[in-house]
Amino acid sequence: MRFQTELVPARLIRRYKRFLADCVLEEDGREITAHCPNPGSMMGLDAPGSRIWLEPNDDPARKLKYGWRLSELPGGHWSGIDTAVPNRVVKEALTARLVPDLAAYGTVRPEVKYGRQSRVDFQLTEPGLPDAYVEVKNVHLRRSGDWAEFPDCVTARGARHLDELADMVRAGHRAVMLYLVQRDDCARFRLADDLDPGYAAAFVRAQAAGVETIAYGTRISTAQIVMGDAMQVTPPGA
């Protein structure tokens, strides 16, 4: 997924009200307010003074003329901020059949109704194969070592998605939870069960029902974010 316009560097002053971030543009020192497209806690990614990258826009319908897209990490690494990006990245990869576990499917349909008044991120179909229901989660929490973790706060909605995927398996379909790690300094994935025990319990139930779990990293630059390599997934308690 390529960014629509060239990103510009800035320094974060503060993030507040979840969706707003005051910043100083490096180019001319102007202080501006950018849209922060991330409703989560962003643990470890919103420290004042950190270097971030913004995407400008000239859309007259938008009040805020910059959107926060990337944060620089120690050691020359990057993290994506926009929680809408993983679905775009995964759609590109599924359409190009770059996800080995799902490469047999030729039709990719986003936002299909299923479960209890929900929409699954992707429904995959192919003659002769059971439909595959794929839910995508954005991951950008790292607390130790090279471990990426999910979630970074309590998510009752995420637990419900796991239960609904389990229902799809019981109905005779495939169901896949795909975690996309939107930072490039991690090599393994696990659940942050201390932050949300309820989600961890739903994960265990889903695995027991036959829901498949896969995780992928990303390759990130100021030009684009694309799917990277598969990651080891460690279940709770392992």
Image (tube, grey):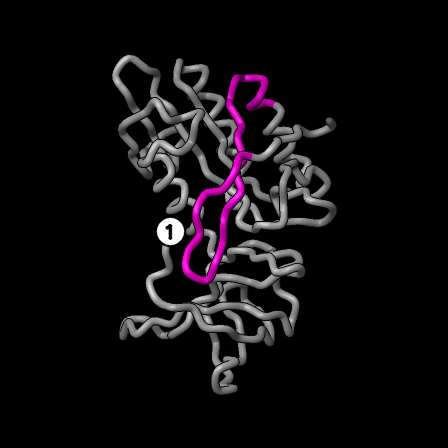
Q: On the image, numbered disc 1 is attached to which residue?
A: 1
Front position in the image: 149 or 159: 149
**Residue segment shown in magenta:** 205-230
With respect to residue 190, does 166 lie above or below? above
Image point 57% across, 22% down: which residue? 207
In the picture, measured across the screen, residue 149 lies left or right of residue 102, that is right
Q: Residue furthest front?
A: 76
Q: How many marks?
A: 1
With respect to residue 27, does 157 lie above or below? above
With respect to residue 180, does 35 lie above or below? below
Image point 61% across, 64% down: which residue? 46
With respect to residue 129, does 83 lie above or below? below
State the image quarter where residue 238 is shown. Answer: top right
Image point 49% across, 86% down: which residue? 30
Would you say residue 212 sits in the magenta stretch? yes
In the picture, measured across the screen, residue 225 lies left or right of residue 15, that is left
